[in-house]
Amino acid sequence: MKNFYRIFVFTFIVLTLAACGSQDTGQLTGVLSRPKWKGINPYGMVYVPSGTLHIGPSDQDVNHSLVQRQRAISIQGFYMDDTEITNNEYRQFVYYIRDSLGHMLLGHEGENGNVDWEQELDWTEPDEGVDGIYYSEGERFAGRKEYDTRKFVYEYQWYDWKAAAYDRYKSNRRDFIKKDKVAVYPDTLCWVRDFTYSYNEPMTRNYFWHPAFDDYPVVGVNWKQANAFCYWRTKLWNEYEASNGNKGAQVNSEDFRLPTEHEWEYAARGGRDMAPYPWGGYYVRNAKGCLLANFKPGRGNYPEDGGLYTVRATAYFPNDYGLYNMSGNVSEWTSSSFNENAYSFQHDLNPDIRYDAQDDDPESWKRKVIRGGSWKDIAFFIQTGTRHWEYQDTTKSYVGFRSALTFLGRSAEDFN
């Protein structure tokens, strides 16, 4: 009985020391005060498991056989938005910038010069102190008091990991922290500019603001604006987690970002290797003759698929991963730079070619891969293996984006 009592007391002391994070047991225990990590499942995102993908054209395509050479690659698991980022989701970003400017104009500053978000700010009856956020009287159309969206500017950052890796700790860390400022408001005028001799002014006036289009994909956003949105989304998530006492949030969470070109293709196929379309078939119609995506099915025949322009982000059936409109509706930005011969030299493990082109770089260096095709494209461009590109500073009425988030761990099933 005494031996049992001694064992019980000894075990209690050991467990108590371990619980307190003591390192004085003489044993190799690791750091015991580490934050717990249970994995996250971001709202509006679906999990895409790690796997192997055969990239390249899924059908006979002689003209693009050199641009899209077939090869096998492996992709790490990640989360991806189940729909394209919608107007209303992107509007949350725009309103964040608007409110930040409003608080600054009213002098609502908290600690360390940061915005004091606890201060009241009512845009239905705005204070005279925020008049600087509106167009001046000489620039107002029909006397309307409207936001001067040119002032909605956001500074975002990214870290040049590749340059830091090859530098081998020789330089100062600040040399690899890159910053850029970007006007975040979508370029609504692209609806007019993209189509000559075509009446699309109603879309310019209404597409981003009217509630009828809240759940439609945002367009008129260039590559830098999409990256700025992902940076803001990461910051929004981390600040919320930290305010709720999750000290490990900023230590353990990955960043929201644009998907790489091949993450996008892997997700689009929905687990159906070599499938030309997300639904797995070789045709764009089902057995009943109904079109399965929003694209241009015939010359001059845009509305046959159910949408003259874009459609709701949840229109049509999702693929087997639960992702909507991976073909058609809007083309989508990826993080990858476009090179015609990329498939010839890129790695087979999480392949990605990235280059942060500067404003004074040659135009060809600013090409970024877009995928998926859009509402105004023919069937070839909505195939899962078709590559295309746009300049990173270009805004189009048919290009949007969705975010990705690298999964930390072997499988999401490990955390269930």
Image (cartoon, rainbow, N blue to C red):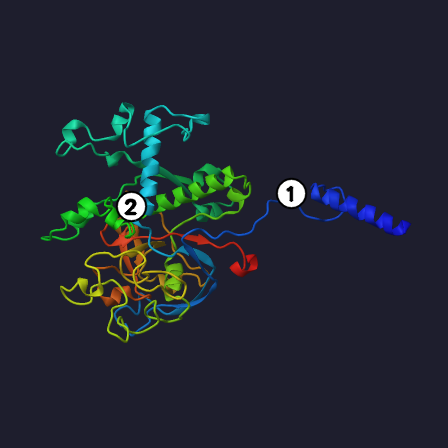
Alpha carbon distance from label 1 to label 2: 48 Å
Q: Is residue 224 visible?
A: no
Q: Is residue 304 visible?
A: yes
Question: Which x, y percent locates residue 55?
Answer: 38, 67
Q: Amino acid at mark 1?
A: Ser
Of all residues, the one furthest to the bottom in this rendering is: 287
Label 2 CA crowd tier, 10 Å (few <14, some 14–19, many 20+): few
Q: Which mark is residue 33?
A: 1
- Per the image, the residue denoted by label 2 is 361
Mark 1 vs 2: CB contact within 8 A? no
Residue 235, by quadrant, is top left
Q: Nearer the viewer, residue 127 or 173?
A: 127
For the image, the number of numbered tags is: 2
Q: Amino acid at mark 2?
A: Asp
> Image quadrant for the C terminus?
bottom right
Q: Is residue 36 above or below residue 320?
A: above
Q: Residue at x 22, y 52 (%)?
A: 397
Question: Which x, y percent locates residue 313?
Answer: 30, 56
Q: Is residue 249 left or right of residue 262?
A: right
